[in-house]
């Protein structure tokens, strides 16, 4: 087998030591999982943004709050995050407002707490699996580096059985080891880019949700007076 054949990517993987092959398989699995979460999160964030814009347009169009609430309740399984926050706040507001001898401030505070609890659940759902992408981005290069170090050690140990250390004897072993680092970077770079993008998008959505909660609380406060 000539050097060109030895240095093909497939041959480098097949000829690597068992430990390096196990590390490559681990990194390939991590990369597959990260790409799965990247696509899943991309669709989830895109859907959440579209539903938020639709509800904001309906809410600020001046429609009746009772009609919006009825629509949110009837279509709960397809409602967006902001719509569910609105539903929780308005439901608590209607319940507390019907109680006698209850201070208006307590009514608004109760509505705020209900919206805050729903907001937290919605943000937990939007931020799901972001920690996995962050871990992949930070850990994968080190896993690949470990495979490279191990592979180089294995290559130099093999030189003890060779009478003369030449480039043709060393190059395949080192190239096999470097493939592990390449796979680690291939797994890490998309994960880091995706994490930064999705973290930015979820932060913007969180800001919109918080602004809505404050504005909606002001609207309810005017109604309870």
Image (cartoon, rainbow, N blue to C red):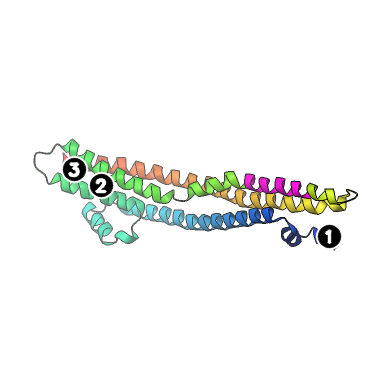
Q: Which of 56 and 188 is in front in this view?
A: 188
At a point 67% along the width and 56% down the height, the residue shown is 21
Give neighbour class at mark 3: few <14, some 14-19, many 20+ (Cα, 10 Å): few
**Would you say the magenta stretch is mainly helix, strand or loop?**
helix
Residue underneath mark 3? 223
What whole-number distance in Å separates the C-alpha atoms at marks 1 and 2? Answer: 68 Å
Q: Nearer the viewer, mark 3 or mark 1?
A: 1
Circle number at residue 185: none
At a point 80% along the width and 54% down the height, the residue shown is 172
Element at label 2: helix
Q: Quadrant of the N terminus?
A: bottom right
At a point 58% along the width and 43% down the height, the residue shown is 138
Give neighbour class at mark 1: few <14, some 14-19, many 20+ (Cα, 10 Å): few
What whole-number distance in Å separates the C-alpha atoms at marks 2 and 3? Answer: 14 Å
Q: Is residue 201 magenta?
A: no
Q: Nearer the viewer, residue 110 or 147?
A: 147
- Extreme residue in the right direction: 164
Residue 92 coordinates in the image, percent (x, y): 21, 47
Residue 60 in view here: no
24 sits left or right of 86 in the view: right
Q: What stretch is highlighted in magenta?
A: 141-155
Residue underneath mark 1? 4
Q: Which of 125 and 157 is in front in this view?
A: 157
Residue 218 coordinates in the image, percent (x, y): 26, 39
Residue underneath mark 2? 89
């Amino acid at each position: 087998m000539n050097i060109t054949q030895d240095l093909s990517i497939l041959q480098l993987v097949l000829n690597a030591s068992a430990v390096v092959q196990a590390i490559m398989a681990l990194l390939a699995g991590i990369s597959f999982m990260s790409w799965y979460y990247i696509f899943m999160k991309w669709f989830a964030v895109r859907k959440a943004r579209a539903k938020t814009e639709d509800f904001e347009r309906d809410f600020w169009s001046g429609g009746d709050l009772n009609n919006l609430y009825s629509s949110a309740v009837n279509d709960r399984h397809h409602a967006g995050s902001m719509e569910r926050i609105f539903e929780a706040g308005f439901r608590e507001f209607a319940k507390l407002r019907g109680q006698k001898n209850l201070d208006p401030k307590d009514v608004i505070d109760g509505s705020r707490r209900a919206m805050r609890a729903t907001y937290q659940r919605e943000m937990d759902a939007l931020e799901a699996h972001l920690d996995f992408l962050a871990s992949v981005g930070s850990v994968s290069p080190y896993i690949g580096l470990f495979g490279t170090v191990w592979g180089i050690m294995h290559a130099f140990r093999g030189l003890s059985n060779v009478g003369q250390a030449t480039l043709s004897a060393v190059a395949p072993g080192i190239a096999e080891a470097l493939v592990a680092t390449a796979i680690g970077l291939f797994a890490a770079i998309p994960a880091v880019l995706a994490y930064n993008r999705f973290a930015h998008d979820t932060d913007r959505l969180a800001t919109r949700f918080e602004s809505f909660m404050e504005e909606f609380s002001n609207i309810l406060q005017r109604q309870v007076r």
